[in-house]
């Protein structure tokens, strides 16, 4: 696989996670059914056989937004859940072009902490710290998989990837520059970089 292939895989993973956060828009009609059907707690509750709407907002007794469900032809369809302070803490949805879908979980301050989604058939996951900086990102498909670990400045510090039977591991310095890595190819040949010595499988010697 080699360091270059591993690096390209890591770069693609970063792009997928950025696209997830920038295109994520919110979905889940099933939750609406649970919330608005069969309610019996007060005189103005009702049971609906069918409800059709482009946008729905659920509020508490003081008018604070709790749940928003909506659809936009250019953006997509989705659902947002807010905490008692009015901060969005959960979003899920699908993009208008059907190329992506996902879930974004935020902390009580509204900063994204966990993202999970599909982008053009490629699943990915990203975790962020309290400052909103990603520290773990992973994803992949039938062509290969990758995991990246980053520091508090979102500088890549370690990565592991698998593609077409080849496995690679890389370690980076605080500038994101590779300082050490190891590759095991599909045929069993393995080596380190910076190169120390290439070792062929026993049956090839």
Image (spheres, rainbow, N blue to C red):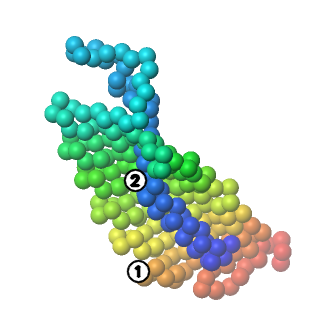
Dot 2, how many residues are within 10 Å of its Cα: few (below 14), some (14-19), or many (20+)?
A: many
Dot 1, how many residues are within 10 Å of its Cα: few (below 14), some (14-19), or many (20+)?
A: few
Specify the quadrant of the image occupied by residue 163: bottom right
- State the separation of the CA atoms marked 1 and 2: 24 Å
* Numbered label attached to residue 114: 2
Q: Is residue 43 left or right of residue 167?
A: left
Residue 27 vs 192, above or below: the answer is: above
Q: Position of residue 71 (x, y in %)?
A: 43, 41
- Residue at 39%, 17% in the rendered image: 48
Question: Dot 2: what SS?
Answer: strand
Q: Position of residue 133 (x, y in %)?
A: 36, 65
- Image quarter where the N terminus lies is bottom right
Extreme right residue here? 204
Q: Is residue 82 visible?
A: yes
Residue 33 vs 196, above or below: the answer is: above
Pointer 1 with pointer 2, Cβ within 8 A? no
> Which one is closest to the eye, mark 1 or mark 2?
2
* Numbered label attached to residue 174: 1
Q: Is residue 107 left or right of residue 124?
A: left
Residue 21 vs 177, above or below: the answer is: above
Count all numbered tags in the image, as a single digit: 2
Q: Nearer the viewer, residue 105 or 165?
A: 105
- Image quarter where the C terminus lies is bottom right
- Residue at 34%, 26% in the rendered image: 35
């Amino acid at each position: 696989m080699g360091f270059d292939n591993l690096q390209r895989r890591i770069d693609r993973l970063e792009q997928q996670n950025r696209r997830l956060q920038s295109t994520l828009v919110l979905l889940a009609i099933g939750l609406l059914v649970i919330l608005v059907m069969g309610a019996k707690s007060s005189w103005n509750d009702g049971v609906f056989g069918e409800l059709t709407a482009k946008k729905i907002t659920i509020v508490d007794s003081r008018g604070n937004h709790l749940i928003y469900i909506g659809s936009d032809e250019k953006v997509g369809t989705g659902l947002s859940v807010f905490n008692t302070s009015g901060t969005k803490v959960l979003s899920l949805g699908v993009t208008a072009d059907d190329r992506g879908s996902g879930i974004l979980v935020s902390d009580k301050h509204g900063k994204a902490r966990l993202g999970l989604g599909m982008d053009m058939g490629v699943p990915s996951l990203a975790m962020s710290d309290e400052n909103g900086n990603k520290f773990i990102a992973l994803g992949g498909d039938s062509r290969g998989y990758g995991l990246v670990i980053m520091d508090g400045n979102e500088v890549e510090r370690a990565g592991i990837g698998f593609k077409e039977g080849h496995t690679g591991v890389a370690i980076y310095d605080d500038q994101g520059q590779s300082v050490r890595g190891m590759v095991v190819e599909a045929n069993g040949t393995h080596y380190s970089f910076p190169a120390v010595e290439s070792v062929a499988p026993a049956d090839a010697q």
